[in-house]
């Protein structure tokens, strides 16, 4: 019986779920650190704002990348809303990964100025939809 319980616990994906921490605004920069993460279903992304006032909001891979629209885009997309660290706090937003598709996000602040400055992030980018290409699309949008 104990063995069965342990086996079930071992098979439960929650046991293996990883929390990936992503810093927004490290050293007062307009950047996500790291700028890309490979994660499994059930993992969490914890976005932590450590300077200024930023968001993590999903957007399109190419075209009108910046600014990301309120509410985010894409199936299973996300939008943290604006999280301000101006009062010295370090607000967080947690997203639980629900699929293996690539997702592209950026900061929505300043009508897209942060996004165009390269404040962008990719979850599970692919060989055909790379972070670097997405970021170049953002900076050109
Ligand atoms: C912040 O500063 C540290 C130490 O200089 C550096 O290693 C890191 O790359 C910087 N991060 C960003 C996002 O600029
Ligand atoms: C954060 O930014 C948003 C969008 O620019 C703004 O509406 C909000 O007032 C800002 N929050 C603070 C505390 O400055």
Image (cartoon, rainbow, N blue to C red):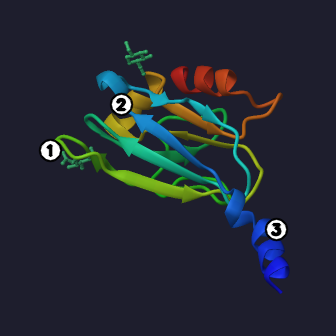
Q: Where is residue 97? Give x, y as percent.
A: 65, 56
Q: Is residue 43 left or right of residue 127?
A: left
Which residue reaches farthest bottom? Answer: 1
Report whether the residue tagged 1 is closer than 8 Å to ligand 2.
yes
- x, y percent for residue 7: 83, 72
Q: Position of residue 48 (x, y in %)?
A: 39, 44
Mark 1 residue element: loop
Q: Identify the residue position indicated by label 1 in the image.
A: 87
Q: Which residue is mark 3?
A: 11
| Secondary structure under the numbered disc 2 in the rendered image | loop
Labels 3, 1: front one: 3
Residue found 83% across the figure and 87% down from its top? 1
Q: Quadrant of residue 99?
A: bottom right
- Residue at position x 25%, y 35% in the image: 52
Which of 129/68 is in front?
A: 129
- Confirm if mark 2 falls within 8 A of ligand 1: no
* Cα separation between marks 3 and 1: 43 Å
The residue singled out by tag 2 in the image is 25
The answer to which of marks 3 and 1 sits earlier in the sequence is 3
The Cα–Cα distance between marks 3 and 2, rounded to whole angstroms, is: 37 Å
> Label 1: few (<14), some or many (≥20) within 10 Å?
few
Relative to 25, residue 56 above or below = below
Neighbours of disc 2 within 10 Å: few (<14), some (14-19), many (20+):
many
For this rendering, which residue is in front, 94 or 6? Answer: 6
Taking the spot 69% from the left edge, 63% from the top edge, the residue there is: 15
For label 3, count other residues whose C-alpha is less than 10 Å away and answer few (under 14), some (14-19) or many (20+): few
Res 61 → quadrant: top right
């Amino acid at each position: 019986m104990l063995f069965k319980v342990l086996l079930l616990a071992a098979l439960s994906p929650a046991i293996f779920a990883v929390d990936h921490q992503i810093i927004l605004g490290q050293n007062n920069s307009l950047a996500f650190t790291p700028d890309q993460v490979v994660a499994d279903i059930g993992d969490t992304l914890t976005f932590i704002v450590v300077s200024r006032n930023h968001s993590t909001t999903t957007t399109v891979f190419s075209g009108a990348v910046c600014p990301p629209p309120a509410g985010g885009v894409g199936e299973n997309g996300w939008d943290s809303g604006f999280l301000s660290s101006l009062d010295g706090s370090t607000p967080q937003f947690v997203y639980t990964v629900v699929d293996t598709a690539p997702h592209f996000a950026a900061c929505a602040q300043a009508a897209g100025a942060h996004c165009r400055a390269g404040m962008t992030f990719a979850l599970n980018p692919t060989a055909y939809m790379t972070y670097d290409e997405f970021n170049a699309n953002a900076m050109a949008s």
